[in-house]
Image: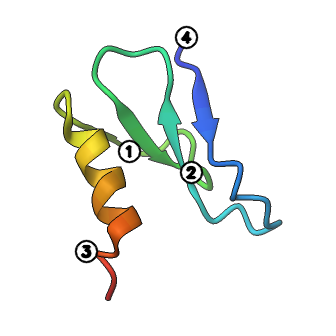
Amino acid sequence: MIHWRKSSHSQGGQGECVEVSTNTFIPLIRDSKDPEGPRLALVPGALAALVNQIKTGDLDL
């Protein structure tokens, strides 16, 4: 069974956030509104790079 973690910053009632697997070798990301839907699998190290890009604003539109 995969365990999922939602950000503590995602406290809105709309469920508009992503969840990250906590007990898999390859990090998985899914849409919390569609838990049975598609999942994005990341190569090791890619999750840390993605989080860093988000935090630094590199992916802002």
Q: Position of residue 48 (x, y in %)?
A: 30, 41
Residue at image position (69%, 58%) is 9
Q: Amino acid at mark 3?
A: Asp
- The label number, if any, that marks residue 22 in the structure image: none
- Residue at mark 3: 58
Assign a secondary structure to mark 2. loop
Side of 10 where 34 appears, left or right: left
Which kind of residue does numbered mark 1 sit on?
A: Pro
Which label sits in the foreground, 1 or 3? 3
Q: Earlier in the sequence, mark 3 or mark 4?
A: 4
Badge 2 density bin: few <14, some 14–19, many ≥20, Cα 10 Å: few
CA gap between label 1 and label 3 equals: 25 Å
Determine the secondary structure under disc 3: loop
Q: CA gap, disc 2 to disc 1?
A: 8 Å
Question: Which residue is label 4 attached to?
Answer: 1
Q: Which residue is mark 1?
A: 38
Residue at the top extreme?
1
Q: Position of residue 20 (x, y in %)?
A: 48, 37
